[in-house]
Amino acid sequence: MSKYLLAIDQGTTGSTALVVDLDGTTLGRGTVEFPQHFPKPGWVEHDPLEIWASVEASVKAALAQAKLEGKDVSAIGITNQRETTLVWDRKTSKAIANAIVWQCRRTADTCDALRKAGHEPRIKALTGLVIDAYFSGTKIAWLLDTVDGARARAEKGELAFGTVDSFLVWQLTSGETHVTDATNASRTLLMDLGKLEWDAWACDTLRVPAKVLPRIVGSAEIVARTKGVSFLPDGIPIAGIAGDQQAALFGQACFEEGDAKCTYGTGAFALMNIGKKPTLSTHGLVTTVGFRIGNETTYALEGSSFIAGAAVQWLRDGLGVVKSAQEIEGLAREVASSDGVHFVPALAGLGAPHWDAGARGAITGLTRGTTRAHLARATLEGIAFSVADLLAAMVKDAGRPLQRLRVDGGASQNDLLMQFQSDISNVGVERPTEVESTGRGAAMLAGIGAGFVDLASVTRMLKLGKRFEPSMAAADRATRLSGWSDAVARIRTNLS
């Protein structure tokens, strides 16, 4: 009897479901977008009901395209936008407020206060993270402090916190299972990175009651079974869970120490496998759980650029420079260079390695000769420059050059961007035939958790589509990087 894996990839702007067979072939795909809500400048929210509705619709679409039914699914894998924070009522399963999205900066002042109180060194040593509004911990406290009566209810154990993976497992099991996997837990500022346990001091410091926290589980194990879901039968094992970037690391078969990938989605996220020890970064990156299989944990260095594909969306929706995201490559190719124009896409602050929440995006080097094409090219180059900063920090932390960079995500299909990434980072860039490594990674984790596939088969399934080799002269690269550094310095508010 054939076995099919269902991957639910719940992202920042939409949900994608994949139906994958045990040979790694994608048989069905469904993608459904949902709205973003921006109640104040710098604030980003999602409606949990809209998230769930998009998941349901995407699963139905994927099964229909694969000409399968829910009863044909042998295991489910979940991958998700990570630090996005939800709190809901355990009895009714109703969220107490909209989800606070990972991009949201509303707790930046709280993070400043925690740093000024001297907590960052211990937080970093404990969790591998820096104190930043990006992560979940301060978001939880904000919800409990702001929603009327929430903190008292949380202390009584009436409320549950979860990142999106927890929320989806809760929904898929009709509230029977409250878990999160180690990769997502490692993004909260609350988990001891070495012990893979919630830390009492961190919870007290960030004012998060232990009673709201889910149980931490591995990335590939049966943690629950579906129950009471209208679009799936009862009893399907939920056997794989990982945050989106870790799922992509797994889907790209980055199983050896030193393997690195970058996912180009709403933001750009570079991860490097650093093996079995959670070595801390000294160059502005964070250390995170890469994946946990059985009793073995693989760690990763990570650098996050908050805006990547979202910069192209802004050109389309905010400025009307292009009518569709697909137009930007052709427009950018109309000019040979950006002609000194730099776009620093700090539209949600600067992430790694700068960690400057107060920074804002900027376009520098404009002249009377600047055209739409120059701006389009500067946007693509700005994404690549931001990733180059992350990769340079990784090389310093790892103490060795990158051998290659595997790439995935929607924007990785842009050849001009990938070639410039290779040129400015001086590394070969490998793009697989299928760039949805996040969903595929979740499917493969579920396959491993359910006992259907192994690591060797995941490696065999990865098929290279195109490789980009660096062709930029060293002197030109140095000049371009210097110009980029100057543009970034102009918007920095935190120059310590």
Image: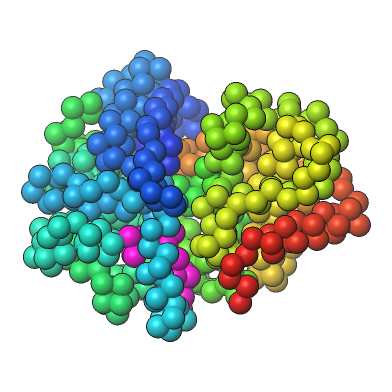
Quadrant of residue 205 in the image?
bottom left
Is residue 487 among the parts visible in the rendering? yes
Task: In the displayed orientation, state which residue is furthest to the bottom.
Answer: 118
User: Left or right of 306: which side holds 208?
Assistant: left
Colour mapping: rainbow
Task: Decide whether residue 470 is among the magenta residues.
Answer: no
Residue located 69% across and 41% down the image: 380
Residue 316, how many percent across, how many down? 58, 31
Above or below for 84 versus 302: above
Total numbered badges shown on the rendered structure:
0
Question: The magenta stretch spans which residues?
Answer: 124-139
Above or below for 6 versus 262: above
Residue 377, how many percent across, how many down? 74, 38
Quadrant of residue 378 in the image?
top right
> In this view of the protein, which residue sits in the foreground, 404 or 461?
404
Above or below for 150 versus 60: below
Residue located 36% across and 21% down the image: 61
Task: In the displayed orientation, state which residue is furthest to the front.
Answer: 368
Residue located 60% across and 29% down the image: 320
Residue 307, how many percent across, how many down? 56, 48
Residue 329, how many percent across, how many down? 71, 30
> In this view of the protein, which residue sits in the foreground, 74 or 443?
443
Residue located 34% across and 56% down the image: 181
